[in-house]
Image (spheres, grey):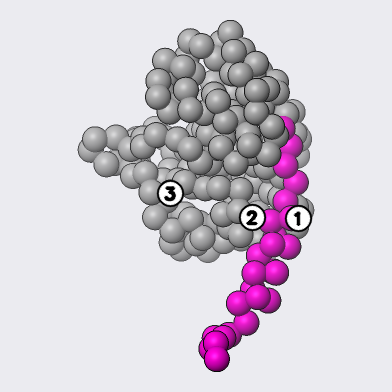
């Protein structure tokens, strides 16, 4: 007679429901656009914004909002405004921001579950997080390990990681074919070949389902 420990079938049903509620948007698979431009468009003049890692890059100074701060685990002198490990105590930052930008951050933290929980606490009610995480992507920590590279995230992993948010929208980055070329040729593919939009053409050779399952990563929008 089989021994059943706990309620695995019920747990699996709950996990499936989390995955099914996630909205998948293929806009960035099929269009040569930068997610940072969408973030700029979605920030309002009365928003309190946190740009973690100053990930908006050249668009950081274009952010028009009431208050704008940066955060990093490392102190670089003039940057950032807040030196903080987002996996530890963030009590001073709770309920402070209406928008948080978290691009290419969660793969570098040692405890993404704690980090996401803290980011949610840092958001005001109704606030949003704009971010990006890698999936099929090369290792990218510096040799001195001033920051590290820990995790990769599938669609299912993100559905569970973001389970406490009201709305979760994922935008796959690169599809089955172009992700493979990006893995093989890294910066050369991104900096040269993708400027021709060849990645958009190549990914049309695969179905939306295959592209979702074998993408480079995901842009995401979370709502508290």
Q: Is residue 99 visible?
A: no
The mark that comes first in sequence, 3 or 2, is: 3
Q: Give the x, y percent position of residue 190.
A: 49, 18
Q: Residues within 10 Å of mark 1 (few under 14, many from 20)?
A: some
Q: With respect to residue 153, does 57 lie above or below?
A: above
Q: Which residue is mark 1?
A: 21
Q: Which residue is mark 3?
A: 151
Q: With respect to residue 146, does 206 lie above or below?
A: above
- Residue 201, quarter of picture: top right
Q: Say which of 157 and 143 sits in front.
A: 157
- Residue 164, quarter of picture: bottom right
Residue at the far left in the pictured view:
144
**Which secondary structure lies at badge 3?**
loop
Numbered label attached to residue 145: none
How far apart marks 3 and 2 lie (CA) works out to 15 Å
Judged left or right of residue 30, residue 90 is left
**Which secondary structure lies at badge 2?**
helix
Residue under the point 62% across and 44% down: 100
Magenta run includes residue 5? yes
- The C terminus - image quarter: bottom right
Q: With respect to residue 213, does 30 lie above or below?
A: above
Asked whether the residues under the numbered discs 1 and 2 touch, taking CB atoms below 8 Å apart as contact, a structural biologist would say yes
Q: Give the x, y percent position of residue 144.
A: 23, 38
Judged left or right of residue 34, residue 82 is left
> In the image, which residues are magenta?
1-26
Magenta run includes residue 135? no
Q: Which residue is mark 2?
A: 159
């Amino acid at each position: 007679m089989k021994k059943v420990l706990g309620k695995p079938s019920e747990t699996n049903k709950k996990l499936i429901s989390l995955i099914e509620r996630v909205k998948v948007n293929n806009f960035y698979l099929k269009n040569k656009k930068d997610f940072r431009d969408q973030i700029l468009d979605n920030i309002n003049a009365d928003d309190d914004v946190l740009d973690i890692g100053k990930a908006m890059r050249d668009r950081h100074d274009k952010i028009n909002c009431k208050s704008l701060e940066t955060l990093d685990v490392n102190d670089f002198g003039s940057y950032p405004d807040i030196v903080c490990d987002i996996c530890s105590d963030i009590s001073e930052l709770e309920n402070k921001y209406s928008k948080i930008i978290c691009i290419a951050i969660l793969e570098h933290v040692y405890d993404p579950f704690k980090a996401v929980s803290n980011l949610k606490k840092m958001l005001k009610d109704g606030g949003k997080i704009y971010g990006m995480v890698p999936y099929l992507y090369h290792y990218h920590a510096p040799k001195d390990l001033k920051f590290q590279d820990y995790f990769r995230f599938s669609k299912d992993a993100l559905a569970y990681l973001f389970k406490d948010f009201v709305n979760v929208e994922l935008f796959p980055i690169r599809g089955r074919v172009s992700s493979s070329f990006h893995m093989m040729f890294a910066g050369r593919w991104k900096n040269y070949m993708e400027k021709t939009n060849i990645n958009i053409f190549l990914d049309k050779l695969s179905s939306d389902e295959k592209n979702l399952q074998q993408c480079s990563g995901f842009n995401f929008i979370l709502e508290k």
